[in-house]
Amino acid sequence: MCKKCYTKCSVNSIRLINMKISFHGAAREVTGSCNLLEIEDKKILIDCGMFQGGKTNEEKNKEKFSFDARELDAVIVTHAHLDHVGRLPILIQDGFKGFFYATPATIDLANLILEDAFHIMSYDAIKFGRSVLYDESDIAEVMSRFKPTGYYKEHDLGGVTFKLHDAGHIFGAAFVEITGEGKKIVFSGDIGNVEMPILRETDSIPPGVDYIVCESTYGDRIHETADEREGIIQKAVVKALKKGGVLMIPAFSLERTQELLYYLNELIDRQKKIPRVPIFLDSPLAIKATQVFKKYPEYYDRDAKNLYLKDDDLFNFPGLMMTQSSQESKKINHTPSPKIIIAGSGMMTGGRILHHAIRYLSDRVNTLLIVGYQAYGTLGRDILEGKSPVVVMGERIKVKCRVKAIGALSAHGDQKKLMDWIAGGPNMPRQVFLNHGEPMASENLQKRLVKELDLRVTVAEREKEYKL
Ligand code: ZN
C-alpha cells in the first residue's frame, strides 16, 4: 500500500516487513550453532559450528544445509569455539561468496581451531575410518575471507547494520546486535561467566532491542560464586596432589587453559598455597592460543592489564613445562608423580588427553578434574556420569581414579547470569529465543523468564522458521 494515497499504487509503498530467523544447529542441544536471519532483503548467518559428541552428531555434520550458502550475504562469527566455527569451510564448499566478520582475536583463534579440527579429522579417518569434512584449502579460503571487525563499531551490510559487543565468554568473543526493518535483534553467541580472570565482563544489552536469541547451556544450573572460585580450585588441586598421583585436567585450549594457568600462577607462585609440582601444558593448540592472548593485551580486564604492564608473564611460571612436540609429551610419562597434566581436548573427544587417560584412568591414586561443559556422547560426559569401563582410542579402560567436576571455571554464565543479562538492558525485549542448551536447561530457563520477568520465551527448534 502507498504511504501517501493509501491505495495499491506502488509509489512510496510500504514494504511488507519480512524478518525471519531459523536455527540450523544448537537447538535443544549445545553444539552446532548456526542461526540464519533474514532481514530486509539480506540473509545473514550467525555462526556455523560443528556438532560434537557421538555418532549422531558426527552424521549431522555431513547433512546438507537447508539454506543455500550461495544466497548468504554475510556470516558473522561470535567466537572461535569449534561448535561456532567448525562448519565454516563447508559454506565455502557450498559456494558462499561473501565475507566472514569477527574480532581480530577470534580470527586468529579460529585459524588454530579449524586447523586442529582438520588434523583430528584426518587422524580419525586413518585410524577409525571417519570422514574428513574439508581440506586445508577450504580453511585457507575461509581465512582469506575474514574481515577483522572491532567491538562497538557500526558496520553496514547495505541497509542492515551490525555491531559487536564483548560477550566475556572467551578471548575475542562477541554478541551481535543487528538492526534492520526498524527492528533490533541480539544474538548472544555464548555468554561468559562472571568475574573470570583476564576477560572483561559481559557488556549489557544495548537500548531498543526487540528480540534476543540467547544461549542456555547452564540454564538450569547455578555455579559457585567468583569469590569461592580460587578456594575451590586450590582445594581440588591440593587434594589430588596429596594422593601422590597424577592430576589430569582436560581443558579447552582457548580459555580454560589460560585461566587455569592464571590461577595456578596465583596459587603456586604468588600465594604459595599449592605445593610446587611439575605442571605440563600438553597441548600444542593451547600453547599457540596462549600466543594469541599475548598478542591482544587490549582485550584484558583491569587486573590482567595491570599485571601485564608490570611485565608479569600471566601464563608462565617456574615449574610449568609446555610440551609442544610429541617427543616432549612422551617424556611426561617418565616424570615421577605427583604431577599435573593439562591437555586437550576439553571434552576428551581427541587430543593428547586421551593418551594420558589410557595410562592413568585406571589407578585410584590419580584424579581427573573436569572443568568445563561435557556434551552428551563425549568421553568426558561418559566418565562424569560414572561409566566404566570406557573405550579410549579403541582400548577398554576401567575408570578407577577419582573424578571431580567443578563449575567454577565454566566459560558460560549460569542461570542467574543469563537472566540478569537478558533483563539487564534499558528495555525488555518483545521476545526471547533460547538456543544452545539441552532441553532441560533451556526449558528451565524459559520457565523462570516467563514466571519472573513476564517475557515471551520460545525454546528454538532445529530447522523451524520463526517470523518476527
Ligand atoms: Zn563457546
Image (cartoon, helix red, strand yellow):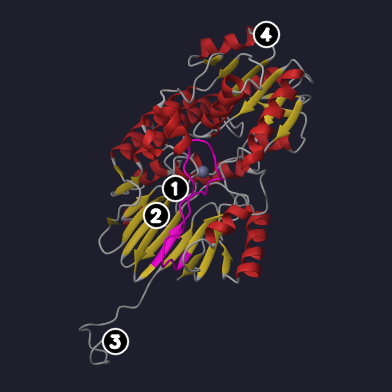
- Helix, strand, or loop for circle 3? loop
Vertical placement of 137 versus 205: above or below? above
Per the image, is 210 magenta?
A: yes
* CB contact under 8 Å: marks 2 and 4: no
For the C terminus, which image quadrant? bottom left
For the N terminus, which image quadrant? bottom left
Mark 4 or mark 3: which comes first in sequence? 3
Span colored in magenta: 184-211
What residue appears at the point 77 percent right and 28 percent down from the top-left corner?
A: 389
Vertical placement of 109 versus 98: above or below? above
Instruction: Label the magenta part by its dominant secondary structure.
Output: loop
Q: What is the crowding at mark 4: few (fewer than 14 residues within 10 Å), some, or many (at least 20)?
A: few
What residue appears at the point 36 percent right and 57 percent down from the top-left corner?
A: 44
Vertical placement of 447 versus 393: above or below? below
From the image, tell me which residue sits under label 2. 45
Percent x, y of residue 350: 57, 29
Amino acid type, residue under disc 1 in the picture? Cys
Nearer-the-camera pick, 123 or 115: 115
From the image, tell me which residue sits under label 3. 1
Mark 1 or mark 3: which comes first in sequence? 3
What residue appears at the point 46 percent right and 33 percent down from the top-left corner?
A: 304
